Image (cartoon, rainbow, N blue to C red):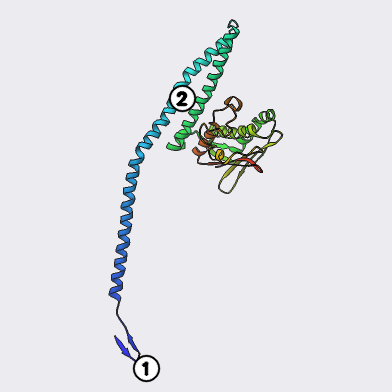
Amino acid sequence: MRAQNETGWRISIVDTQSVDSSLARQTMTDVVIVLVAMAVLFAIVWVISAWIMKPIQKSWDSQRRFVSDASHELKTPLAVILANTQILLEDPNVPPDTRTWVESTNDEASHMKALVEDLLTLARTDEAQADGAKRVLALEDIDFSELVDECAIEFDGVAFERGCSIESKIEPNIRLQADRTQMARAVRTLIDNATKYATKGTAVDVRLKKTDKHVVLTVHNASAPMDPEDLEHIFDRFYRSDKARSREETGGFGLGLAICKGIIDAHGGTIAATSTAEEGTTFTVTL
């Protein structure tokens, strides 16, 4: 419809309802096509990725079972070796030269037993993460404040022998659903590690507090800072940040922090480490 006014201007009115409706339908159709295409693409990618990951998952499961089975199989012969060496060491008729070899065998068998137990623990934590913690961990309601306090007191004497001390600030009555044995091992590992590398004459600070949604445990010591590269791999298995120290000096195989991380991960928590010359080294567990 057109109209002309007195000034010579023309006004046109066009009915675009049909065009607008057609455009709206076309837009809706395009949206549906895009959504369907994305859904189909997602399904294809999901199937392909599952197919690609299947041999990797199978290999990982086989490796996990092998570590667990091999560790179990090694426990019996190691127990026999240790029992036999103990019998020989208690025999007064064993010549001194022979006793030296028996003691060496006993020490190495003891180290091997500790390694096997560590590997078993790692296998259990891996299984807990893969198959669900409830199937592997003995979850129960525990007083985490009491557990941390007991671990700190337990290492008082150790810290004294290593030339440091332990100071704890633990918020009371913090409770968790956790495997008490495994969680105690994780806490002991952190405190043991902190006292082992603390500068002589300093204090290892153990703190536990509860925030709105999380429980936070920190273990801090004043020590020489770790290199950034070492810090990046501190939780890797068999990794040693202090390569100059032998196993006899540190008393471990480089598995302690890896086991600790595995336990924390299996409980749905996180663990992180920071280390600077000014602030020292701090391990933070968030549950």
Task: Tell which residue pokes out farthest to the right in this image.
Answer: 201
Please identify the quarter of the rendering in which residue 56 is found. Answer: top left
Considering every residue shown, the one lying at the far top of the view is: 93
**Nearer to me, 287 or 51:** 51
Instruction: Choose mark 2 or mark 1, whichever is in front.
Output: 1
The amino acid beneath tag 1 is Thr
Above or below: residue 100 compared with residue 56: above
Dot placed on the residue nearer the N-terminal end, 2 or 1: 1
* Badge 2 density bin: few <14, some 14–19, many ≥20, Cα 10 Å: many
Residue 73 on image: x %, y %: 44, 21
Q: Does residue 65 appear left or right of residue 84 in this picture?
A: left
Closest to the observer, 195 or 229: 229
Residue located beneath label 1 in the image: 7
Quarter of the image with the N terminus in it: bottom left
| Alpha carbons under labels 2 and 1: distance apart | 101 Å
Please report the residue visible at 32 percent of the width from the left and 66 percent of the height from the top. Answer: 27
**What percent of the width, then of the height, locates residue 199?**
68, 35
* Rendered image quadrant of residue 276: top right
Secondary structure of the residue carrying numbered label 1: loop
In the rendered structure, the answer to whether residue 22 lies left or right of residue 117 reads left
Q: Residue at x 72, y 34 (%)?
A: 201
Q: Position of residue 110 (x, y in %)?
A: 54, 20
Q: Which mark is residue 71?
A: 2
- Would you say residue 172 is visible in this rendering? no
Of 197 and 120, nearer the camera is 197
Question: Which amino acid, by three-letter code, is at mark 2?
Answer: Ser
Q: Is residue 9 left or right of residue 149?
A: left
Q: Residue extending furthest front?
A: 244
